[in-house]
Image (spheres, rainbow, N blue to C red):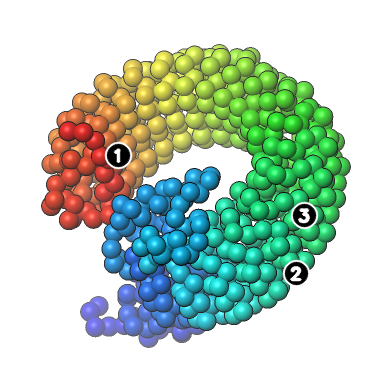
Amino acid sequence: MKGADLINTVLPEEVLLEILRRVESKPDLDSCALVCRKWNHIDRATRRTVKIAASGNADRLLASVIQRFTALTSVFIDERHQSSSHYSLGLSTPSKQRRNSLSGSRGRNRNSPGSSSTSSAEDTGIDQNYISDAGLSLLALGCKGLENLSLTWCPTLTSLGLVSIADNCKALKSLELQGCYIGDEGLIAIGQCCKLLRELNLKFCDGISDKGLIDLARNSNSLISLAISSCPRISDMSLQAVASHCHNLVALTLELDSIKDESLISIAKGCRSLKSMKLRCINVGDLALQAVGSFCASLEVLALHSFQGFTDRSLYAISKGCKNLRELVLTDCNLITDRSLEYIARGCTKLEHVEINGCQNIESLESIGRFCSGLRKLSLVYCSMLLKNAFIEVGRGCSLLQSLHLFDCMKIDDDAMCQIAVGCKYLRQLHLRRCNEIGDKGIISVGKNCKHLTDLSLQFCESISDESLFAIAEGCSLEHLSVSGCHEITNNGLTAIARSSPDLISLDISVLLNVGDIPMAELAEGCPKLKELSLSQCTKITDVGLTHLVKGCVELEICNMVYCPLITASGLATIVSSCAKIKKVLIEEWKVSKRTRRRAGPVLTSLCTEL
């Protein structure tokens, strides 16, 4: 009733506090804070976590957040975050120059203005768009109970700001510095002051060297997780220090080309509690991985990327010593053969996740099917030598399989797909890409047998037609579907999906030349939960189809419609004005009218093309 408080007068404040504490999503918390002054006061005093988009006047935004929330323990600052879903002052839309510098900084070599020095960032005039040392000092003084701090791709930060964090936030347990140009002084201060530190991410930290990491390792006996990637000034000396002092290490990620066998051997001997190792070290070979097999008996996750120097002997050692292995990822490991998979399958029977990418000498999965009955996820990418009968044993023995990814496996055909469908009835996710030997027969079998399937991707599988979608529509209710590049699919197949999948969330029908407006109307009527839609290069969809779409798909957040010649500025305006929750629209720049641009603002992502 208007004017009557039927909650605050009845519930004790401690009960109300406990209720609000259980609200997890930021939008819901924000809504609760607007109910009344009392709830707003409770929210200010109790909110523990914020995620901040480091855009606009970043320091001013950070100061505002600190002043509003006085009990923060977790702060995540990420330049890549969209301001629509995180805290933002909404002061300005990032300039084209800044977007370009950001996209450059995401690459492996980080040739961005922020990768050289703070002064370099100031010279380009973008420093105000990022969190600075002054802003970080404000955070340190205002949130002395901070436990988790993530600073991702904040290029103007230096050791000065990190020293302030170290001096004031003694309870810090987790620190992420990915893409930040932090020097040794900041890292040394963290090691000396933050004795509770357990997790540290140093990916793409060009400014640190052996001096900083060695000193930190000597003072961080509590460290359990360490990630180092593309840090050119880190050598074997740092890893020797980690091995000598960080005996409680549980998770290690290393992507360093300079590392040799001796360093990894030391890690294996000194950090015997390791459960997760993710390695990209091109100069490491059999000796190092044999040491891992000998000393890391607790290992559960092993990912080996771009290893050119190890052979089947390495995985033989892993199979003998790491009996608890549950996840194995092999990427571009060209010297291993089917014997490696046989060793692992026989020795590591608890395997649940196997991913093989670009390993050209793998031909068979027979041993995986025979000995890994608990397998739940199998991903095979660019395995050109894999034979079609490889799935016979997988279909027979891996009845619990829930996720299957096959990308560019050109020899896999309908018979193999039928083996999987018949034997793996709990399949929930099936992603195929450029598997041209798989046609309607295999997908029809999936529709008949895999009733739990909710996520289906058939990208550029050119033998797939409407018959496949009819079978899927009859047997499954999808949440995610991608049929991009399946040229045989028409309005009829998509109509069947729209009528059978009321929980559909994302749909990609890009590059379908035989699809028009009819499925848009069907989606509006049958798929009210649709949030993501890609129509790019659909040459027959028009503004009329979009008008029908927005009548029912009011939850739409992302819409990609590049190179759709029959969609005009009017169609774009329909999407922007009718979908209140829209966050991103990708379209050619010349189709964006001034009025739509004013209304949509940062929602639009324009693609510059010739008229």
- Three-letter code, disc 2: Asn
The Cα atoms of the two marked residues, 3 and 1, are separated by: 49 Å
65 w.r.t. 355: above or below: below
Q: Is residue 59 left or right of residue 175?
A: left
* Among the 4 quarters of the image, the one containing residue 385: top right
- Front in this rendered view, residue 228 or 238: 238
Q: Position of residue 13 (x, y in %)?
A: 46, 84
The Cα atoms of the two marked residues, 1 and 2, are separated by: 50 Å
* Callout 1–callout 2 Cβ contact below 8 Å: no
Q: Secondary structure at mark 3?
A: helix
Q: Is residue 334 left or right of residue 7?
A: right
Mark seen at residue 560: 1
- Three-letter code, disc 1: Asn
- Which residue is the site of mark 2? 219
Check disc 2: other Cα within 10 Å, few if <14, some if 14-19, many if 20+: many
- Three-letter code, disc 3: Met
Q: Earlier in the sequence, mark 3 or mark 1?
A: 3
Q: Earlier in the sequence, mark 2 or mark 3?
A: 2
- Which residue is the site of mark 3? 237
* Among the 4 quarters of the image, the one containing residue 525: top left
540 w.r.t. 130: above or below: above
Point out the image quarter for the N terminus: bottom left
Check disc 1: other Cα within 10 Å, few if <14, some if 14-19, many if 20+: some
The Cα atoms of the two marked residues, 2 and 3, are separated by: 16 Å
Identify the residue at image location x=64%, y=65%.
184
- Residue 285 visible? The answer is yes
Q: Secondary structure at mark 1?
A: strand
